[in-house]
Amino acid sequence: MTEELMIAGCLKNNASAQEALYNRFSPRMLSVCYRFAKNREDAEDMLQEGFVKVYTQMFQYRNEGSLEGWIRRIVVHTCINVLKKNKKFSDSLDIAYANGLHIREDMIPSIMQAKQVVECIRLLPLGYRTVLNLYAIEGFSHKEIGMLLDIEESTSRSQYTRAKSMLEEILIRKKIILKPKEKIIYQAAVAPR
């Protein structure tokens, strides 16, 4: 079934069109939900809720951009709304975590390790994981994240920085990446003249 037929069918609440839309896009959207959720069951719940919104909001799709991108945006917003309903989410945005590690772009693992990296991202505290997903993966700006999560833009930035550091630590601990070699700087002692 073409996208045009699926859209037309969904607008008429046609079950076979809704099923076709779900079958085409749900695997990719489940992976989006999985990055935000604590476990597979939560991800599946987010996915179902997201597709209900897709079906009820289909009249708002204007054929501007890809249908998949439009669905993805709804699913991401659904995930955020589910997380915001959870009391632990607001608490986790206040975690004060800092260490001396700084992530470097040249340390990003190869695509073969992508599944391991996603699993490591899921180990981050909820607030860190959410901001990292929204900024680094979904492409939201810190300003947009602030509005979505009802936090300051600066809080989004600091959560992202801390999330990267914590993720690097987890990746090193699980031996997915190597610990960066410390740069030793030798300073020559200059005798006063």
Image (cartoon, helix red, strand yellow):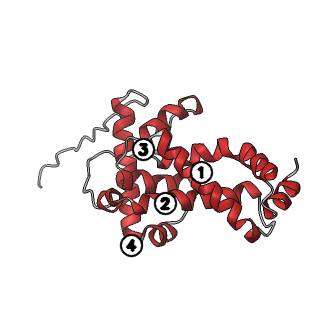
Q: What is the spatial separation of the Cα atoms under label 1 and label 4, in whole angstroms?
A: 30 Å
Q: Can residue 158 be seen from the camera position used here?
A: yes
Q: Nearer the viewer, mark 1 or mark 2?
A: 1
| Nearer the observer, 7 or 18 | 18
Q: What is the spatial separation of the Cα atoms under label 3 and label 2, in whole angstroms?
A: 13 Å
| Outermost residue, left side | 192
* Residue 48, numbered label: 1
Marked residue nearer the N-terminal end (1 or 4): 1
Marked residue nearer the N-terminal end (2 or 4): 2
* Residue 152, numbered label: 4
Q: How many marks?
A: 4
Cβ–Cβ under 8 Å for marks 2 and 4: no
Marked residue nearer the N-terminal end (1 or 2): 1
Counting from the top left corner in percent of width and height, residue 104 is at 44, 45
| Nearer the observer, 108 or 72 | 72
Q: Nearer the viewer, mark 3 or mark 4?
A: 3
Instruction: Indicate the amino acid at tag 1.
Output: Gln
Marked residue nearer the N-terminal end (1 or 3): 3
Q: Residue at x 42, y 37 (%)?
A: 120
Q: Secondary structure at mark 2?
A: helix
Counting from the top left corner in percent of width and height, residue 142 is at 48, 66
Q: Secondary structure at mark 4?
A: loop
Task: Judge left or right: residue 18 versus residue 82.
Answer: right
Q: Which residue is mark 3?
A: 38
Instruction: Indicate the amino acid at tag 4.
Output: Glu
